Amino acid sequence: MSLRLHFYGAARTVTGSCFLLETDDARVLVDCGMFQGSKEERELNYQHFPFRAAGIDALCLTHAHIDHSGLVPKLVKAGFDGPIYATGGTADLASIMLPDSGYIQEMEVNQLNRRNSRRGRDTVSPIYTEEDALTSLRQFRPVAYGQWQEVAVGFRARYWNAGHLLGSASIEIEVTSGDKEEPTRLLFSGDIGPDHKLLQPDPDAPRDLDYVVLESTYGDTDRAGTTIERRRRMLRDEVRTAMRPGGALLIPSFAVERTQELLVDLMELMEAGELPDIPIFIDSPLASKASAIFKRHAGELRNGADLVQALGSRWVRFTETVEQSKAIDRIHSFHIIIAASGMCEAGRIRHHLKAWLWKDEATVLFVGFQAQGTLGRILQDGASKVRIHGEEIKVRARMRTLDLYSGHADGPELKTWLSERLPVRRGVFLVHGEDPALKALQSSLAGLERTPDALIPEIDDVYDLSGERPMRTDRPEPRLPGANAGHRDWHNDYAELLLAINEAVEAAADKRAKGVIIRRIREALRSGVRE
């Protein structure tokens, strides 16, 4: 049997999840996610797919997060007309998240094109529009957990609850071909939830497999001793420290599930008297729509009744319109703003950061993973100045991190999850992680019995899975060299240099000193051109 596995995303980086399983008879895609992070990685979203979209027979989605589903509309627009298999929860969330992604792209491209026109640069087009996203939803086919689904010739899939997000799944795929009696059994972990999720169950998946493709986002992290109660105490302490007259606590958060978990915890703390009553603004139309979907699925969720109660609190305000969002700026007492995106790359959180970063009374609390090259990671790493919407902003606000709301299992939990899948006879691939996390998890798994050593593929790697062990085959020039994946790029360095130049010129004692700095920079530039 000929069976090949292509790693088109989430290889040595945490976004852009996309894997292609290919036989002589059919081609099945697992996830079709959007790249986030550095500009060099995001530019991959605008390139042509490294495969022919019309040649894909089926798409299986692990869950609705944009780094796993965000390029589905582009795939359909490029000619894919096959079924998209997803759980009911994933299909429901995708029905709001994908149109929202298209809308944001249209708005941001409009703003960019206005700036480009003023600068005499070419205009650009969005990856896809809101209408493109709505069109792609027609191809979704809901599937139930635990039931086999024929997805293409020689392929069948079964979905297992991954405990990461409403509707999230690890996908088991059996591939048969020709006269071979025994199928090849693969498991794509998707994103695996941690042990302390408020709304989701513990992850589940089958044993006895040939291959496992395992996420590694927090492969180098150990959150030993984490409980929901401990997380709430730490959140309480962060909020208390942030409470300043006329100040605000900004929480960049994914609109789907992370926001809902935060809301339940904040309301529990307020009701218990651990925090005073504080106005909480959920400044995200997507979060509002997502909360309605979570409310419909409350019966399927752990602590679903607590979520419904929190959503109805008089201290919680959902903002829909731009005018309502701007009105938050007129509040003079301490308040909390939860807004997307979680990595500060788009959405309303950037407007609030622009309004508050330069103020001592503000605190920014990061509650999830910040990929390399994102504004969130740059702030988290201690930048003194940043650029937002083309403007330079001084950072005076406090930066804090409470990484106990992550929807991802940590290193020991990932190892435990894999040990419960054994035996894994032929291969383990580590994906969806940056280098430190990948290598730490690879080292941790090295002593695990009844499983081969874990491999770390790079973007566009192809492995032949036909033999007793996976064999990497020749590949075309990768779209993103492995050394560049999951790292800052020259765009980040350029932005940092501009800020450093401005700071040096401003700090110069007088006009003469300023002139010396500018002259030296020009000489360095000329020297660089000559070299």
Image (spheres, rainbow, N blue to C red):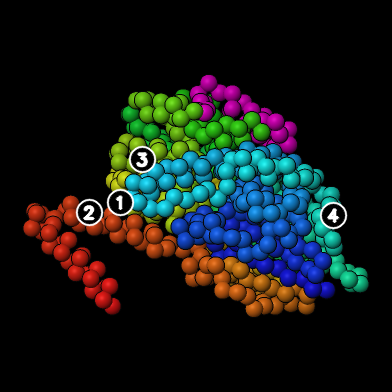
Please tell me which residue is depicted at 83% across the width and 74% down the height of the picture: 1
Disc 3 versus disc 1: nearer the observer: 3
Residue type for callout 1: Ser
Residue bearing mark 2: 503
What is the spatial separation of the Cα atoms under label 1 and label 2, in whole angstroms? 10 Å
Tell whether label 1 touches label 4 (CB within 8 Å): no
Residue bearing mark 3: 354
Mark 4 or mark 3: whose residue is earlier in sequence? 4
What is the spatial separation of the Cα atoms under label 4 and label 1, in whole angstroms? 54 Å
Give the secondary structure at mark 2: helix
Mark 3 or mark 2: whose residue is earlier in sequence? 3
What is the spatial separation of the Cα atoms under label 4 and label 3, in whole angstroms? 50 Å
Disc 4 versus disc 2: nearer the observer: 4
Rendered location of residue 62, percent (x, y): 69, 52
Q: Foreground: 28 or 126? A: 126
What is the spatial separation of the Cα atoms under label 4 and label 2, in whole angstroms? 61 Å
Residue type for callout 2: Glu
Tell whether label 2 touches label 3 (CB within 8 Å): no
Above or below for 517 versus 149? below
Rendered location of residue 46, percent (x, y): 54, 56
Residue bearing mark 4: 150
